[in-house]
Amino acid sequence: MPTDITNTPDELFETFVNAQTFKTILHSFDDLCQSIRIDRKTIGYGKRSLYKVLTSKLTSWKSKSLWTKIDKRGSQKEYENGNACADMKVCIVGAGPVGLRLAIECALLGARCIVVEKRDRFSRHNVLHLWPYIISDLRNLGAKVFYGKFATGQIEHISIRQLQCILLKIALVLGVEIYPNVTFIDVIEPISTQQGWRAHFKPETHPIVSTYEFSVLIGADGRRNSLQGFQHKEFRGKLAIGITCNFINLEYLNNQYLVELILVQ
């Protein structure tokens, strides 16, 4: 994807906000960082270092709205101003909603966090019903900045794909490193006290993850369960039947006032 270096950082931020696929979100964020001349090796990876640079460089009303939300959330005492886990290095397997939300929390705590995902696109269009505390959590992280229609209906719901897009963008601005097309294979134990835990990934020659030493490994890849040796429980609603009906929303004003229903039999 070509980079238009004539765009201002605030214009590139707007492109990033409007991106709607896994690839375009990553590309547009890379373009944004290049326009601000961000060097991750220089500014560091933990302690919300990337986020601090972005907040000092981006001044549009939309970016300021996001910073206000994240700053308020990040000021909670548990995070210790981004120093609670500043010495921790985390690796998360899976960029689904759970993996990305975990990554956001790790970044708020000040840890360096890498997320690996074997796919390079978000394709799960299943619609989730959101509980009130989930809506509050996402709002407080700035979800509406990235998706203006978030939580506007009478029954709060969102597609998994759209939720992933929102969480991915929040994770990126907080400094989380996301690597698509990377498959976790197994853990590599350290052979000396001077070395940390690593993992075997495919491709084996990946310039970052192949040498990344972590102190925490989190499996967030769902039923696939790549981390071996751990017991897990799985709920299967064998008698449950789900019926999905898709209707075209013509965006008419009266469509916004239609009553939404959940039918359970």
Image: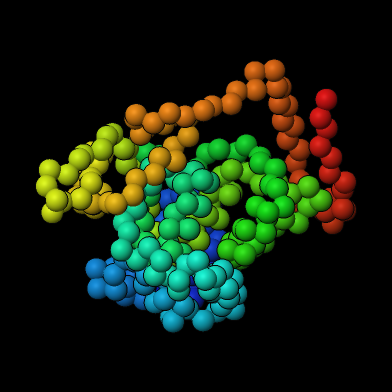
Q: Quadrant of residue 240?
A: top right
Q: How is the image coloured?
A: rainbow
Is 35 displayed left or right of 20 in the figure? left
* On-image quarter of the N terminus: bottom left
Taking the spot 44% from the left edge, 37% from the top edge, the residue there is 221
Q: Quadrant of residue 248?
A: top right
Location of residue 139 with respect to 83 vertically, above or below? above
Taking the spot 20% from the left edge, 50% from the top edge, the residue there is 196
| Residue 55 x/y as whole percent | 46, 77
Is 264 displayed left or right of 35 in the figure? right
Q: Quadrant of residue 205?
A: top left
Is 148 displayed left or right of 23 in the figure? right
Is 262 displayed left or right of 230 in the figure? right
Instruction: Give the tally of numbered discs.
Output: 0
Location of residue 160 with respect to 138 vertically, above or below? above
Is any atom of residue 31 visible in this view? no
- Residue in the foreground of this view, choosing between 226 and 58: 226
Taking the spot 78% from the left edge, 52% from the top edge, the residue there is 153
| Residue 137 x/y as whole percent | 62, 58
Is any atom of residue 163 visible in this view? yes
* On-image quarter of the C terminus: top right
